[in-house]
Image: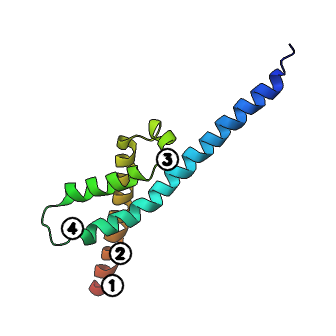
């Protein structure tokens, strides 16, 4: 029996590369979806006071449900929570910058 090691190694590398590309694509999609989910959660819970934790859980649950099952071993719920927090922080910084511009223009 003659084993073609080069073909086996190439196949393994292609499978690993495909998985890695899928992982990166899913993570990037999660960041895009997080922004929309955060905005949706804001509207969904706008009549509630102090619903920050509920909105956060809503977004994390939604995003985690969109991850393909094989990737859930590598993209955990904690990772999704970190992505959600990161996107929220970015949105907050942007909003603060825009408010600073508005108040600076009114001041001048």
Task: Give the Cα separation between the discs numbered 3 and 1.
Answer: 47 Å
Frontmost residue, 101 versus 44: 44
Q: Residues within 10 Å of mark 1 (few under 14, many from 20)?
A: few
The furthest residue to the top? 1
- Left or right of residue 1, residue 77 in this image: left
SS of the residue under disc 4: loop
Residue position for label 1: 105
Percent x, y of residue 2: 87, 15
The residue carrying pointer 3 sits among few (fewer than 14), some (14 to 19) or many (20 or more) residues within 10 Å by Cα, namely few
Image position of 4 with respect to 56: above or below: above
- Residue 91 image point, x, y percent: 36, 64
In the rendered view, tell whether residue 43 sits above or below residue 63.
Answer: below
Which badge, 1 or 4, is on the more N-terminal residue? 4
Question: Circle 1 sits in a helix, a strand or a loop, which is it?
Answer: helix
In the rendered image, which residue does mark 2 sit on? 98
Mark nearest the camera among 3 and 1 is 3
């Amino acid at each position: 029996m003659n084993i073609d090691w080069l073909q086996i190694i190439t196949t393994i590398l292609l499978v690993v590369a495909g998985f890695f590309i899928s992982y990166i694509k899913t993570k990037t999609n999660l960041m895009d979806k997080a922004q929309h989910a955060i905005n949706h959660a804001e509207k969904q819970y706008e009549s509630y006071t102090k619903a920050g934790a509920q909105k956060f859980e809503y977004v994390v649950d939604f995003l985690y449900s969109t991850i393909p099952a094989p990737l859930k071993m590598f993209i955990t719920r904690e990772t999704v929570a970190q992505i959600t927090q990161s996107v929220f922080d970015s949105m907050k910084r942007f909003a603060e910058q825009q408010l600073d511009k508005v108040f600076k223009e009114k001041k001048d």
